[in-house]
Image: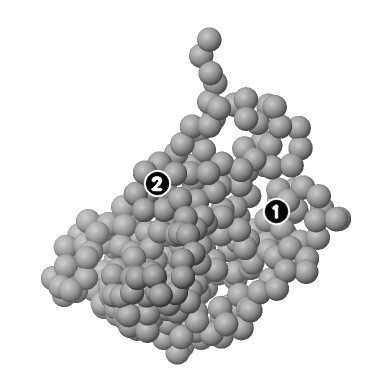
Amino acid sequence: MQVQSRYIGIACPSCGAEKTINIPETLFTEKKFGHVKIQVPKGAVCQEHVFVVLLDIKGRILGYQTVDLSVSTPDAARSKEEAQAEVDESLGLMKFIKLLGFRCLAGLIHAKLFNYQPYVIIKKDVQMDMDEVNFFLDDVVPEMFRNHKALKHIEYNDYVFPTATYFYALVKNQRKAAFLMNLHKHIIQMPWQTGLDLEKGFIATALKNKDPIEQLKYLSFYITKFLEDVDKTKIIIEPMKKISKKDLVKKLKEIAITSTVTKEYVTSIKEFIHRRDSRDIAKKIHD
């Protein structure tokens, strides 16, 4: 007899890689309450990380947990690489990826840039340094965007709401235009259609620099570069009645020669203009 499976899209909390995996249906039918934990091995979603995905008994994602496979050793026996890895995770981008998750960090950057109010849902009695996260977000964006739509928290009381997904549904209904995430590194609501490829690209490219301090500088540089391309786009389309994304890609490539200009990149520029500048200007760009 063929075993029925359920297909669930998951994302690595450490690098943001996404993939749909199939899970036996019996895992949910045999579970009457609580939640399901599934350890995802290396290679199943990404090639480098092991993590745990948390699901409710209906197969809805509640969050993720990272798995540390390293074994503690005497200080004298530890390699320089192991020591450096620990330093890297306490500084720069890795500090915030470890705290928030790769995709949630990308989502917060998008919310900051594109003017969406972000919230993190925090379980009662759980502490989080909101000021540190907001300082980081302000530090990597240009001054004109600082202190706008700062990250706020929503308290989740599991005594009043024993089912997390029910509480999430209530919050989503109350704040339909907000970016919502939890401290299990899971995005609960993303109120835009363009995805996170732009911001994930910023983060991934910045991480190629091994210096934690330089990572933040590079992230800020890529964000500023995108905003410069937004300004170049407005100059191109200002005298026009309309322009296709295909034609805009060609024109941008001519003047933004150090940027990787694609149709998806132009879609992000259009959304930024729509959210931050003028809907009428944004409407000039069509498929």
Q: Is residue 273 visible?
A: no
Where disc 1 sits, the SS reads helix
Residue occupying image coordinates x 65% and y 31% = 28
Q: Is residue 232 visible?
A: yes
- The image shows residue 230 at horizontal and vertical percentages of 32, 74
For discs 1 and 2, the disc positioned in front in the rendered view: 2
Given the current orientation, which residue lies at the most extreme right position? 160
Which of the 4 image quadrants contains residue 143?
A: bottom left
- At x 53% / y 18%, what residue is drawn? 3
- Count numbered badges in the picture: 2
Query: Residue 87's spot in the image, x, y percent?
Result: 43, 77
Say the numbered circle drawn on residue 42: 2
State left or right for residue 200 relative to residue 33: left
Which dot marks residue 168?
Answer: 1
**Amino acid at pointer 1:** Tyr
- Kindly identify the residue that appears in the image at 62 percent across and 25 percent down: 26
Give the vertical position of 41 relative to 262 (above or below): above
Q: Residues within 10 Å of mark 2 (few under 14, many from 20)?
A: few
**Most foreground residue, 136 or 214:** 214
Badge 2 amino acid: Lys
* Name of the residue lying farthest toward the top: 1
On the rendered structure, is 143 left or right of 64?
left
In x, y percent, where is residue 189?
59, 56
Quick one: SS at disc 2? loop
Q: Nearer the viewer, residue 11 or 49?
A: 49
Compute the Cα span from label 1 to label 2.
Answer: 30 Å
Q: Position of residue 139 (x, y in %)?
A: 46, 85
User: Which label is found at residue 204?
Assistant: none
Q: How many residues crowd around disc 1 within 10 Å: few (fewer than 14), some, or many (20 or more)?
A: many
Q: Point out the tag, 1 or 2, that comes first from the N-terminus.
A: 2
Identity of the residue drawn at 45% across and 50% down: 50
